[in-house]
Each structure stands twice: as structure tokens, then as C-alpha cells.
Image (cartoon, rainbow, N blue to C red):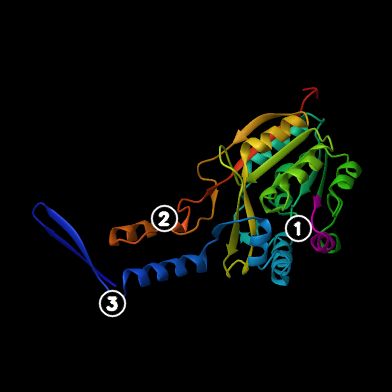
């Protein structure tokens, strides 16, 4: 496709000339986007239908890349990793870090974290330098059996440990901080898991990087991960924010802070540029959200605990 721009007095216009039809150009635009970006497909009727269409979390290449990335961080070859993607420049997770330090300050400088769905310790490695000033620190990641086993075999030390049992981890570690970051939306029954987590009675809870919206019902999508990260697809759920907050209150937790940063979005169905194809008479409304899905976060404290 070639693009020409014409400018004369009081007139400015563009002309596009292409051998491809608008439909072919739209298809090519979507394919380029999908090759390099996380994108979403749906909504699906329910979780089971989306699961049937997905390749799943258990593809060997996901764990293999997660281990390789964690090794690089542990060896000092990268500052931290997120979802297996390596970052060379240090960057703390500032909202989460402030919550962690507040919890530690309320406990005499002691912080004992249970990190549900924490992979191979991604958030621990990202923030460990800032947490090294504490009097006592422990960080227990709760994960699926195969991930917990891999973590225990290679990454456990005096601070970092791994478990596959949430209730047992909270009890054994004497946790004062429970972290659920970017995990609830990937569970078949997130409210049941949240109830189990909150029933542990841990004083501080952070529910972070959670795909949730107010005033809209739950919906299930299929999340596609591009090959440059690791090629996979799995179900993901947009959660209802009010249902989450009702569950917090049910277990005696008050909301200290609610976060919804404007920049904190994750993935979309297609690039915003496809809107231009509507000028050619194509209907792009069926593609879904073009703006990215929002993350919400909550920092909670169990009511009745002393300040």
C-alpha cells in the first residue's frame, strides 16, 4: 500500500493506493498485532468452553522459560522478570512495596509473605533489595505442584520457599501479609479461592493486578500469548469488582487503598488503529476492546487489628 499526501491552499488530504482490499489489509493488520502482542478472544459462554479452546498453562515451554528467566535474575544477569520477560533496569513495584513496608512496620520490622500464584518468586526478586533492611523476612510462594517442585529444587533459600498448599503455607510461615497478584482472573472459581485465602486470617492482604470491572458481570475470554514470550493460550476471567469487595467485607477486611492506575492495562483484542478501517465501511465493533483491559488492586487489613 502506498500513501500520498496532497496539500494546496485551504485543502489537505491523503490518498491510499493498494492492490489489497480493505478486508485483506484489516486481516494483515490483525495478524501483525497478534504476532507481537498479548491479545484476547471472546467472550466465551463459560470457563469450560474457553478451556477446550486453549492450549493451557501446562505446556512444557512455559515452565522451561520461567526457570531460565528466574535463573538469569538470581545470577544477576537481569534485574527482574515478569511473566518470563527479562528486564535489565531495576524497577520496584512501588504500590506493592509501600504496602509490604507498612505491614512490616506494624509488626516490628518483620515481614512474612505468602505469595499465592507467585511463579518462581518474581515479585520477591523484583523487590528484595528494598526489603533487605527489614529485621526478619520470609517469602513463601504457593503454586501448582510442578512449579512449586521446580522452585523448591532450585530457588529455595533461607528467605524464599515454595508450597502447593495455601492454608498450610499461611499457618507454617506465621504470615502477616498475603499477596494475590495477577492470579484470581486465571482461576476456574476465583471467589472460592479468595474465601479460602481470607479465611486464613492474615492481617494484611494485597489483591493486586486483578482484571476486574465495576457494574459489569463476569465474562470469560481466551488470552493469547505471542511466541516471543511463549506461545500459549488460556482462559481468563473479567471479575466483578463489587463481588470481590463484598467477599473482603464478609471476612472482616477493610479496604485501606484501592488502586486503578490509568496506565495499568493489559492486552486488548486488536490495535486501536483498526478503527481507521471503519472509514472504509468495515465493521470492527465485533473485535472487542481496542483500549486494553484495566487492572484493579486492593490493599486490605483485617478489622480489629491494632494500628
* In-image side of 65 versus 26 (left or right): right
- Residue 277's place in the image compared with 21, above or below, is above
Q: Is residue 172 magenta-colored?
A: no
Q: Which residue is mark 3?
A: 19
Q: Position of residue 120 (x, y in %)?
A: 76, 58
- Mark 2 or mark 1, which is nearer to you? 2
Q: Please report the residue visible at 81 percent of the width from the left and 64 percent of the height from the top.
A: 146
Q: Please report the residue visible at 88 percent of the width from the left and 43 percent of the height from the top.
A: 173
- Residue 29's place in the image compared with 297, above or below, is below
Q: Helix, strand, or loop for circle 3?
A: loop
Residue farthest to the bottom, as pictured: 19
Of callouts 2 and 3, which one flags the residue occurring earlier in the amino acid sequence?
3
Please indicate, yes or no, whether residue 98 appears anywhere in the rendered image: no
Q: Position of residue 113 (x, y in %)?
A: 80, 43
Q: Which residue is mark 2?
A: 285
Q: Position of residue 216 (x, y in %)?
A: 56, 41
Q: Please report the residue visible at 66 percent of the width from the left and 43 percent of the height from the top.
A: 208
Q: Helix, strand, or loop for circle 1?
A: loop
Quarter of the image where the C terminus is located? top right
Residue farthest to the right, as pictured: 172
Q: Residues within 10 Å of mark 3 (few under 14, many from 20)?
A: few
State the extent of the magenta-drawn residues as a range: 141-151
* In-image side of 100 versus 285 (left or right): right
Q: Position of residue 79 (x, y in %)?
A: 65, 56
- Mark 2 or mark 3, which is nearer to you? 2
Q: Which mark is residue 120?
A: 1
Amino acid at each position: 500500500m502506498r500513501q500520498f499526501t496532497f496539500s494546496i491552499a485551504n485543502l489537505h488530504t491523503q490518498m491510499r493506493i493498494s492492490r489489497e482490499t480493505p478486508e485483506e489489509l484489516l486481516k494483515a493488520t490483525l495478524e501483525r498485532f497478534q504476532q507481537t502482542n498479548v491479545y484476547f478472544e471472546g467472550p466465551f459462554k463459560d470457563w469450560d468452553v474457553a478451556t477446550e479452546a486453549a492450549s493451557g498453562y501446562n505446556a512444557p515451554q512455559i515452565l522451561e522459560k520461567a526457570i531460565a528467566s528466574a535463573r538469569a535474575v538470581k545470577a544477576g544477569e537481569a534485574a527482574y522478570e515478569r511473566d518470563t520477560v527479562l528486564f535489565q533496569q531495576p524497577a520496584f513495584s512501588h504500590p506493592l512495596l509501600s504496602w509490604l513496608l507498612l505491614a512490616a512496620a506494624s509488626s516490628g520490622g518483620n515481614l512474612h509473605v505468602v505469595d499465592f500464584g507467585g511463579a518462581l518468586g518474581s515479585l520477591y526478586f523484583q523487590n528484595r533489595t528494598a526489603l533487605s533492611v527489614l529485621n526478619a523476612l520470609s517469602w513463601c510462594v504457593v503454586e501448582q505442584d510442578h512449579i512449586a517442585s521446580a522452585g523448591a529444587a532450585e530457588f529455595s533459600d533461607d528467605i524464599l520457599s515454595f508450597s502447593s498448599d495455601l492454608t498450610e503455607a499461611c499457618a507454617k510461615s506465621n504470615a502477616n501479609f498475603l499477596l494475590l497478584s495477577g492470579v484470581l482472573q486465571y482461576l476456574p472459581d476465583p471467589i472460592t479461592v479468595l474465601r479460602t485465602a481470607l479465611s486464613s486470617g492474615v492481617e494484611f492482604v494485597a489483591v493486586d493486578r486483578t482484571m476486574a470491572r465495576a457494574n459489569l458481570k463476569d465474562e470469560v475470554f481466551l488470552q493469547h500469548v505471542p511466541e516471543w514470550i511463549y506461545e500459549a493460550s488460556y482462559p481468563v476471567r473479567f471479575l466483578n469488582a463489587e463481588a470481590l469487595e463484598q467477599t473482603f467485607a464478609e471476612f472482616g477486611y477493610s479496604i485501606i487503598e484501592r488502586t486503578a492506575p490509568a496506565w495499568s492495562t493489559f492486552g486488548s483484542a486488536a490495535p486501536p488503529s483498526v478503527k481507521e478501517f471503519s472509514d472504509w465501511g468495515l465493521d470492527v465493533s465485533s473485535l472487542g476492546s481496542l483500549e486494553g483491559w484495566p487492572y484493579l488492586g486492593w490493599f486490605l487489613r483485617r478489622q480489629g487489628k491494632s494500628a
